[in-house]
Structures are given as C-alpha cells and as structure tokens.
Image (cartoon, rainbow, N blue to C red):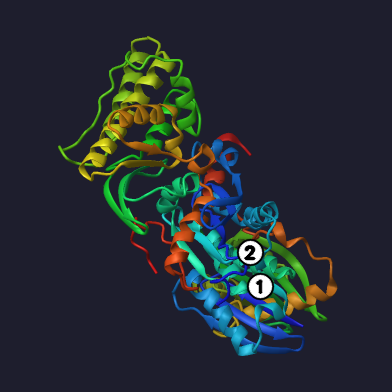
Amino acid sequence: MFILGVDTATSVAGAAVIEEDRLISERFVNNLKTHSENIIPMIKQVMDDAGIKPDHLHAIAVTGGPGSFTGLRIGMSVAKTMGQVLNIPVIAISTLRMLAWNVYGVNGIICPVLDARRNQVYTAVYRSAPGDFEELLNPAALEIDRLVSGLMQFDEGVTFVGDGIPVFGPFLKERLGEKAHFGTLINSRPRAAAAAELGLAKLKAGRLPDPMFLQPVYLRKSEAELTWEKKHGS
Amino acid sequence: MKGVDTVSGQVVILGIETSCDETSAAVVADGRTTLSNIISSQVPVHQKFGGVVPEIASRKHVELVNSVIQEALNEAKVTFRDLSAVAVTYGPGLVGALLVGVSSAKAAAYSLDLPLIGVNHIESHIYANFLAKPDLELPVICLVVSGGHTDLVYIENHGNFRLLGQTRDDAAGEAFDKIARAIGLGYPGGPLIDRLAMEGDPEIVDFPRAYLESGSFDFSFSGLKSFALNYLNRVSMTGGEVNKADFAAGFQKAVVDVLVDKTLAAASEYKVRDILLAGGVAANSRLRKEILCRAGGMGLRVTYPDPVFCTDNAAMVACAGYYKYRRGEFAPLTLNAVPGLKLGADKY
Ligand SMILES: [Zn+2]
C-alpha cells in the first residue's frame, strides 16, 4: 500500500512516499522558491525514486492546516485533484499533529507553535499516548501570553516544535525556564513523511470524510470578514 | 506523453478557470464544441463586501474546484481518461485564486500524464469568440472590456497579440461598479446600470469623454468617474434629486462612445474587416447595439460571444488552450501563477 504525503503549509515544501512500514523516498526544501513551482516536480521526484506511477497510489495525505493560507491551498488543491483523478482517498492531517509527531514519545507535553503574526501562534498541546497523542488543547490561534499561562498549569516539561520558535523561543524560555525544550533543525519543521505515516493510520482506522469538498483548516477568518464583523457584529 | 493523437481524432481539452470570483471547469472538443461549461459564481458571497475579497475567493475556489471539474466531466459524458490535455488560466488575476486552478491543473496533468497548457486570461476572453464562430478569420481588432481590463488588441494570427491600447486608470467595468455603488444599485454594477439605463435618457446629463492624445488607443475613465461623483454630490447638496435612470443612461453612453470610437479607429488603421468584443462588459446591450450599428455602416463585421461566454468561464480557456495545443505550446510542471501576466507574453 503506497501513500503519498504532500506538505506546503509553511515555508517548507515536502513530498514523500511510504509503503506500509517503510519510508521509501522523501524530499524537503525550504529554499524560498514558491511552493507552486516546487511541489509537483517534487512529487514526481519522490514517485520516480519509489519506482511507482500515480496509478499505484492508494491514498494521498496532505497537511490540513493551520499554516500559510496560500501554501495550504496549493497543497490541498494538488492533493484533492490527484485524489479525484486517481479515485483514491485524500486524508488531511493537522499541521500541528504532524509537527508533534516529529518528537513523538518525548517526556512531558508537546507544544507545536507556528508563527501566526500579530503576536499569535497557531498551536495545540499534545501528550504522547500509545501509537497516538492525547490532545490537551485543541488547535487554535492564540496570543503567546495566553498560551504561556495555559502551559504554566502543567507541572511538566514542554517540548516546542515549529517555525514559531525563532520568533517566540526567547520569550518562552524566559517565562517557562527549565521546563521549556526546543526542537532541533531537523524535527521542528513539518515533514511530508509524517503526513503520509499519520495518513496511513487514519486510512486504516477508516471513516474518512468525502475529499471532494475538503478544505484547509485556517483557524482564522479573512481580514475582510474580521473587519466586517467588527463593524456589523458577527 | 499521451494524448497528442487521440483515437477518435478529436482533441478534448479540460479547461479550468479560477482567476477571480468564478470557479469554472469546461470540456471542449476541437476548440469549438462546448461539451460542458460549469460556472460556480461567488457573486453572492462577495456582495456584502461590495467587491471581490481575494482571500475569500481563494477559499471558495479550493472548496469548489473539484466538484466543478467533476460536474464538467459528467455533463460532457467523458472521463479523465478521454482527455487530450488540461488547460488552465495562469494570469492575469488574483494570485491566490489563480494558484488553486493552476495547482489543480498541474496535479491532473501529472497524474494523467497529459500535456499542460497555461492560458492568459485576456487571451481566453478573446478566444470566447472562436467558440461562437470557429471559422472566424484573422486578422481582427478585439476590444476586451471587463471589471479588470479595457484593452484594444490587434490579432494578426493565432498566438500573436499586439496590445494597441489599454486603460490608464480604471477599467470600464470598474467604473460601472463604482458608479452603481454611488447611486445605490449594488454589485456587480455593469448589468444593473445597463438595465436601469434602458429607462433613461442619455442626453440629460452631459458627461465628459476622454479621448487622450490624438491617435492614442489608450483609455481613461477616472475623469468621467470624478465628474459623475461630483455631479451626485452637487445635486444632493443643493437638495435636488438625481433621476437615476437618466444618470445611468448618460454615464453608460459616455463610456460606450469612447470604446466604440477607439475600436473603429483601430479597425480602420489596421485595415481589418472583423471586430471582436470580449469580456464581461461585452455583454452590455448599449455597447453591442452601438458598435453593430456603426461598424455596419463602415462595412465591418462584429462578433461577440454569448453572454455566458462573456463572463469568466472555462470553455474559453479550453478553446484558447486548443490553439496552443495545435502549436505544441505546453507548459512545464513548474508553471506558476502570474498575476500581472501581459497579453502575448507567455511566462513559460
Ligand atoms: Zn475576465
């Protein structure tokens, strides 16, 4: 069973092919080129490396958000259309869960942080459980201060992963002191292979939503809607 | 690569269009037979904002694009395997919106091992005329008028577009939208003004017309727009009331007069026999009537697409794609959206 993983949710673009218990091929770039130019050639490359054609795929897993609005849409459009053409399932995996998967099994809790600008992060809080995570805080866009006060309630170490670290790392360290741990270069960015691996698990568990109308989870409304609601009340 | 020679001998192209606020997919055979043309309009979604919100448009596209594609295939009674190529609008337009169509088209082309064709949105508007009249002969002069564009184009042969003039400020359709809003008609303004103008007398308000330097094929509607807004202001300040129908009729006539004059001048200068209209404003009834009447007097023929092919739609994209297909102008899988794509200046 071959699963293609696709990720363009943050500044990273990634593609990977896994076959059940083997990660066969993966590409990862964070080269400041546009995802639109990168992603299909990268998919083609990992497929060629795996020695398979699109027809051989059983499912596609894609980063489901949060992340860059445009980036999410590129990955989602690619995954949905490939799924449609090949008539195979498309499975959306939370960007935050993918990030947490990179450090699955560490002691304490895991807190992915994506820079959401305006002093906010897209975040969630997980604790490793057998084969999966316990979700202690649902994905949300939060002020960094609110996240910190929430984390203070836990009497255990926190491992941060994600592109929010360069922005908020010093602040988190200052507030949480010894309790704060930070992911490394290789595990604090989303990995397409993680999408594929988590996607495979979801596929096996069944009950997948219809991919036809699948949309990214943005966790934030558009600027125009926020302004409109401020003026008219929501 | 598959598809270059199909068994049936027909070239069947799937077109995808997401450059602004319509999500559209179509299947067109041999560049002339529209097997399907599905358009999902977002107009109601953007109405409360008084115009297209790019982020919302992009979100809608990603939600709808696949079901629209499916509907287009179903209605055409073809499957993905029957296609010869995939054509997509890659500019000009809203970058986030374009990217949804471009990403989908590339994913389809890669998965099916089919040629990918990137199409310029303005060129596709022009090609809507070939859906109406496949035996149309070149060269022609085409006036492209929409909410985003006012371009006068000379087309010598397929794929050879020369921009003779364009708007220096507002597009014609944009001017319609702004004036419609100013007199409380709502959005989109073009069709609403068109309808209201039918009940009005265009000679009541004396609107200015901007011809710019002599010999110029450029347009400018900002002076006309300011005049109109000032006029409304003046009337309301003196406690008077504007007859909206007369106002709309006068405004529309001022826009149409300049469009028609310049188009006919271009036709004479380039010695063509055919004039094409394209774009959303090409559905304007006054524009059609006026240009038909005056071009007829000069022995010129005028072609314009059916109203459904004047709005943003994917059949015109598939049609434009067909002519590129015949020339073997295929795009690489690195194809990107180019929001400011110029006419006749392919970026691949
Ligand atoms: Zn258009």
The chain letter for the residue carrying disc 2 is: A
Indicate the position of residue B68 as horizontal and vertical percent values.
Answer: 64, 53
Tell me: A182 left or right of B90: right
In the image, A186: left or right of B153?
A: right
Give neighbour class at mark 1: few <14, some 14-19, many 20+ (Cα, 10 Å): many
Q: Position of residue A98 (x, y in %)?
A: 67, 75
- The reply to whether callout 1 and callout 2 are in contact (CB within 8 Å) is yes
- In the image, residue A75 lies at what x, y percent? 59, 68
Q: Which residue is mark 1?
A: A111
Percent across and percent down for residue B116 are 51, 68
Q: Is mark 2 within 8 Å of ligand 1?
A: no
B313 in relation to A230, above or below: below
> Which chain is disc 1 placed on?
A
Q: Are marks 1 and 2 on the same chain?
A: yes
**Is A10 situated left or right of B151 in this image?**
right
In this view of the protein, which residue sits in the foreground, A217 or B87?
Answer: B87
The quadrant of the image that shows the N terminus of chain B is: bottom right
Q: Residue at x 33, y 30 (%)?
A: B296
Q: Kindly tell me whether residue A78 is visible in this rendering.
A: yes
Quarter of the image holding residue B250? top left
Q: Identity of the amino acid at label 2?
A: Leu
**Above or below for B228 versus A29:** above
Q: CA distance from mark 1 to mark 2?
A: 10 Å
Q: Earlier in the sequence, mark 1 or mark 2?
A: 1
Res A147 label: 2
